[in-house]
Amino acid sequence: MRRFGRTLATAALTVAVVGGTAGWASGDSQRAVTGPPPGTAAWRADTVSGRSLPDPASASPQDVARFFAGRYDAERRELVRRHPLVVGNLDGAPVPLRYEANRLAVLATGEARFASLASPGRQILAFDPRGRGQVVEVFGDLPRAAHVSVVVPGSDSDATTYDAKRAPDTGPAGMARSLRAAAGEDTAVVAWAGYTTPVGVGLDAASGRLAEAGADRLARFTAGLDAIGAPDPVLFCHSYGSVVGGLAAGRTDASDIVVFGSPGMRADTAAGLHTRARVWAARGPSDWIADVPNVEFAGIGHGADPTSAAFGARKVPAGDVHGHTGYLAPGTRSLAAFAAIAKGEVR
């Protein structure tokens, strides 16, 4: 009975914290963008050489890869021209086709908030303009990379803010660029703002609702990497992104899952993630995430602290990290460790 009372007290504290009464910022409730991309109905009504096109809602990335492998180059390009939003978001489709399709899809929106994504040289692997927008960008040569890493960001990441001007080496694009620079030319790093994230640190950030929808998308994305023959990825999951990574862990072929600034992974232990990936965790001494109660009760909170000894993750040195977003700052021990993990140099 006494243990139950402590659980209730901790849960009450969690609700108070995430509701803003303990000094956190409140956040607006978000509706997760899920399902196939806009334009799917027109895509399904179309054919190529008399053959039906793969259903984005049900075809596996392997199915998609086989479909495109059997098409002539002219047929592929015609599909890009007619259905850029669909081709650009089809996991398993050839990477260069997706880059071109997403450039066209961004331009077709006519929206200034997305315009920079169509700039020359950008490699946009996925783009969905619905809601706040979702975007996935590649840094490096994904088809030829010896190593692939995926950065899974936390709150306030979307197609318009993920590469906004902010402190260097923060935000999805900034973290991806920093990791790529540290890991080297044979590593491709993907900034994956491919799910609806919480806004601020309110009840959305304290619940698993958006993370569950994001985990489905992340699992399919990693299956898409496998379908095109990419190496097993390393997932680098920051803040709320580590909740997404935890829920997706058992459904990916990741070699390693690295969480930093994590409020929890919706598991009591690393073994409870049901993954063959090695699990790593880092938390800096001034990261405010340490003040978040590590509890999960009635859908609120994300469970055990991944940096605790009881959780069983491998520790990443982070003693020189400043704040909640400084883990990939040049010169930090955490960035050096991240780069070694990304390159498979740590056994």
Image (cartoon, rainbow, N blue to C red):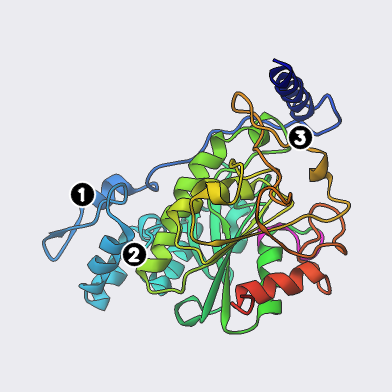
Q: Mostly what secondary structure, the magenta segment?
A: loop
The reply to whether residue 44 is visible in this rendering is: yes
| Viewer-side label of 3, 2 | 3
Name the residue: 86% across, 31% down.
Answer: 23
User: In the structure shown, which secondary structural element does the residue marked by tag 2 occupy?
Assistant: helix
Q: Is residue 30 left or right of residue 202?
A: left
Q: Nearer the viewer, residue 269 or 98?
A: 269
Q: Is residue 3 above or below residue 197?
A: above
Q: Is residue 269 magenta-colored?
A: no
Q: Residue at x 46, y 69 (%)?
A: 99
Q: Residues within 10 Å of mark 2 (few under 14, many from 20)?
A: some
Q: In the image, 94: left or right of 247?
A: left
x and y percentages locating residue 281 in the rendered image: 69, 57
Give the mark nearest the N terminus, 2 or 1. 1
List the residue tagged with mark 1: 45
Is residue 117 rendered to the left or right of residue 340?
A: left
Q: Compute the Cα span from label 3 to label 2.
A: 50 Å
Report the mark closest to the observer, 3 or 1.
3
Find disc 2 in the rendering and name its residue: 81
Amino acid type at mark 3: Pro
Q: What is the span of residues highlighted in magenta in the rendered image?
A: 167-172
Q: Position of residue 240 (x, y in %)?
A: 66, 45
Query: For residue 293, which numbered disc appears in the image?
Result: 3
Task: State which quarter of the image contains the N terminus.
Answer: top right
Mark 1 Cα shell of 10 Å, populated few (<14), some (14-19), many (≥20)? few
Amino acid type of the residue tagged 2 in the rendering: Arg
The numbered mark at residue 164 is none
